[in-house]
Amino acid sequence: MQSSFSRRGSWARWSAALLLSLAAALGAAAPRPNVVVVLCDDLRWDALSCAGHPHLKTPNIDRLAAEGVRFANAFCTTSLCSPSRASILSGLYAHAHGVLNNFTEFPAHLPSFPARLQAAGWRTAYIGKWHMGEDNDAPRPGFDYWISHKGQGKYYGTEFNVNGVRETPPGYYTKVVTDYALDFVLRQTPGHPFLLFLGHKAPHSFYVPEPKYSNVFAHVDIRYPDTAFQLDNKPEWVRQRLDTWHGIYGPLFEWRKQFPDRRPEAVKDFAAMTRAYWGTILSLDDSVGRLYEALKAVGQLDNTIFIFMGDNGLLNGEHGMVDKRTMHEASIRIPLIVRYPPLFPRPRVLEQLVLTVDVAPTILDLCGLPPLPNIHGRSFKSLARTGGGPWRSSFFYAYNYEKQFPYTPNVRGIRTTEWKYIHYPHGDGSPDRHLAELYHLRRDPEERHNLINDPAHAARVRELRRELERLMRLAGALPDRMPVDEGVKTELPEASIR
């Protein structure tokens, strides 16, 4: 018979083995990931060499894409800085989060992914351009560490609120905020997860490249895009804005007050402006490279969800415009790259329609945290892992008329994988601004041919209008009852987006 000593010894050995197994299992478990979000301002989706730009070389951003997932069809749901940033934080459309213009504060009570990460133990930092609440640089809820400033900021000489202490560091904005970001990363405790949200000013106007990049593109011959002068089939407001307050505002961002302008001196100014825009992007690429190397140096690169994106696109001459706000492709399409080898080991370029409202639910999903309540976005974790599966085939877009920037009316529209329907309800009240636009994007990606008045597409218009109503109703952006007119040119009743 086995002695009690022997039994106790066997139990002790079994218990020790169990504890060692548990310890090994816990030790083998993946640590909670860090999150780094690099948000650029007014960065076009195609202004990267990995997206096919013929002149811009962005090797550090390209490296993220080569080691991660690049979404070739990523879009904002409102092409305007503050509303789009609020959608990224909250996973909500603008009518739900309430930030409808560039002068509105992000509601302090509104759930956001940084606040959710903070509550779950992540150390959270916001560094750079916040741009919600023009006159407020105070720390916002959800962040333990805060470095930001009022309004747009300047490429040189911006005063920052550094955790309650104001500083005006010398140097170029992109480099300054990157220095702050690296300091935050290098001071983190190993094994303790962190969120770094880095908001760049670049490449927002007025474009000022670093001196080392000011002449990089001097040899490139730059002309207006062909569509700058192809306005005959566009709504009346598009043609009118050339001679309205928009012209006084300065569509070439201080380079020239009249646009488009075929005179040689005007073409020269347009080229100079474009080269300056590109130059600011080269500094963004440097910033991404420095962050990449810092994360690698502290052994956290592959344990970090690294997201690079823009808040909205930018029209650079297309359809006679230099701005955003509208629903044309250059305005709504954004770059979006996600690198996270533990879950996305296979580099991919995905064509599915991904939105700014998807960012918050995806980050929380990747971090193993509960989703935010009642949001409009969805996690693309599974899509990025497998490259397929059920996903959206359409989304709606909404922009609300701003008195401060009256050259763009209200916009409501729908984009599918193949078609786009844009409607302008009410605008400033002028009846000639109620025209719509219809494009077959697969055949006409540059939106040259507005098919709205072609009888052959009347059924398509009715189908898209019904889908637009369905999507808006699903998002709570419509009244309970809204008649759908079967006509092609008639007006869709105004949505209840505040």
Image (cartoon, rainbow, N blue to C red):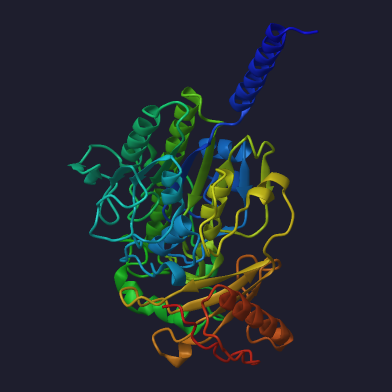
* Quarter of the figure that contains the N terminus: top right
Relative depth, front residue between 274 and 94:
94
Relative depth, front residue between 123 and 497:
123
Q: Does residue 191 sit above or below 477 in this rendering?
A: above
Relative depth, front residue between 142 and 484:
142
Name the side, left or right, on which 184 lies relative to 18.
Answer: left
Give the image location of residue 428, x and y in percent.
39, 85
Give the image location of residue 304, x and y in percent.
52, 35
Q: In this view of the protein, can residue 56 be seen by the observer? A: no
Q: In this view of the protein, can residue 106 be seen by the observer? A: yes
Q: Does residue 245 sit above or below 119 in this rendering?
A: below
Name the side, left or right, on which 452 lies relative to 97.
Answer: right
Name the side, left or right, on which 406 lies relative to 396.
Answer: left
Q: Residue furthest right?
A: 1
What residue do we see at 57% from left, 92% from top? 490
Name the side, left or right, on which 440 lies relative to 339.
Answer: right
Number of marks drawn = 0
Give the image location of residue 65, x and y in percent.
60, 41
